[in-house]
Image (cartoon, rainbow, N blue to C red):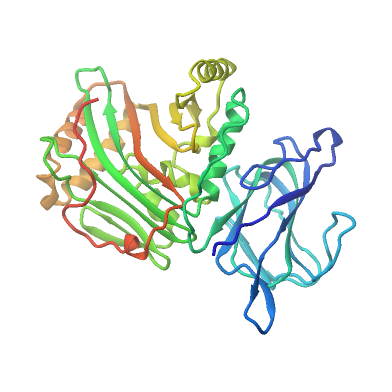
Amino acid sequence: MSLQYNLYELEASTVMDKYSRIVELLGKPIGDSLLEQLVAYVRVSPRIVDDGNYRSFEFADQGFCLTATMDQVKFFTVAFILEPAGRKYQSWKPYDGELVNSIKISDSRTNVKTKMGTKPFRTEVKRGSFDRNKFYRHDFYKVDATDFWFYFDAETEQLGGLFVTRFDVKPSAPASTFAPPRDIRNPLLILQQVASVYQSCSSYRDAGKVEDRFNPGSDDEFSVHKVFRTYFRRPDHFLFEWAEVPADNAKHVNQVNAVWCEGRATYSNFLGKKEEHATLNDALQTMVGVSSGASCMVPSLFLPGLAPLAHSRLTEMQMTQMEIERFVKEAEEEPDSALHFRGTLWPKMSTSMFISREDLRVRSVHEVSIISASSGKQMTEKVLKELESTSAKTAEYKDVVDALRKQVNSESENLRISTAYQYDTAIFNDDIGENYFVWSPYQYSELEWAKRGP
């Protein structure tokens, strides 16, 4: 039986009354980008377990994840509070009771672990400003109590967002419905809802294809096609594999490459070379270039600590007023079509994205970027060197190698890259077994091959 959380935001207050408001919490962002201080309380009601001898209350099969993105953090306070049976609250103040034994809060630069006493844990941040994409995260799995309370207090120059999401440690049946976009006139809010869907899923799997077109429309244009698939199960099971499609549209794809983690160690296999990585994020970011960005494009939405290289997450798209007005007009005139977002990802990457209205999943992404001639040739020469260093694989990639050599010798001032991602299948909260995360090198894969062309 899968536990269903009852999450409530009981109070969201700030030092500036005009920004005070109450919002839903389950997988939704709290607060405003201009908030200077936020205090939020969350109540989670557990299930009752009765074995005939005694009754207990537990969270055996589920957990929840706190994710906060902040700029210029002054301090943050986190406390996990257990409420004794029968205790009634007259006000929404943090309960000074028994706390969970320990908590670990970390980002890429620091790890803090402390024993919890009867007071909320508080740490001072003295290192100055934090990047917006640095995350504080805590995954909580089990506690015996009548009620479980979560308390978060952060004082910041700017609060980028606070998410509290739930997930199954043991995935349950797929969710039956997704909340549709509430306000079609606010595309930026819809993007936050999309982020919440991915951050709160218990599992995710997809299959798709990606096409890179280099200098499209020019005499030296060439394309590279790849197919990929992803399997993910919280908290730490992951598989991403991809391969390039042969030039002759053969039945099978070329050498399959992969990044995988079965809950313990993390490995990658590229062109037959297996490596172990310190973290899953390191492995995925190492492969972001050779996978045409697919290793991080969608995984960065459900892995809070993972950020795509060179640009921000899809859900952090910047839109001009003209782009917002165009979005609203198209969404209202075509109520049965997918939502079409147009905008820019940092620094200057023009991006177009289609989102399903029904379940808020990413259906396709198209990006256009321009790289200077010197940077483009350096990047091309690096990839070419990696391919030619493995002579056994050079024949398989002959068409790609020839195109790369042509690019290095071209006289183009800049390298224009058009990348299109198509997610043919994307499923949330499915039951994904252990066998999906056991990977071994092999020549061919079940990856569906894709034809060249538009």
Where residue 187 appears, as percent x and y from the top left, is 57, 27
Name the residue at the right extreme: 90
| Residue 82 vertical placement versus 185 (above, below) | below
| Residue 361 vertical placement versus 436 (above, below) | above
| Residue 285 vertical placement versus 49 (above, below) | above
| Residue 66 vertical placement versus 300 (above, below) | below
Q: Is residue 31 left or right of residue 196?
A: right
Q: Is residue 33 left or right of residue 368?
A: right
Q: Nearer the viewer, residue 417 or 170?
A: 170
The residue shown at (49%, 58%) is: 172
Where residue 129 appears, as percent x and y from the top left, is 66, 45
Image quarter where the C terminus lies is top left
Name the residue at the bottom extreme: 53
Q: Nearer the viewer, residue 213 or 357?
A: 357
Name the residue at the front extreme: 52
The residue shown at (16%, 54%) is: 443
The residue shown at (55%, 27%) is: 318
Where residue 159 appears, as percent x and y from the top left, is 69, 41
Image quarter where the N terminus lies is bottom right
Q: Nearer the viewer, residue 427 or 412?
A: 427
Where residue 268 appears, as percent x and y from the top left, is 31, 57
Q: How many marks?
A: 0
To which quarter of the image does residue 422 belong?
Answer: top left
Q: Is residue 71 left or right of residue 422?
A: right
To which quarter of the image does residue 44 belong?
Answer: bottom right
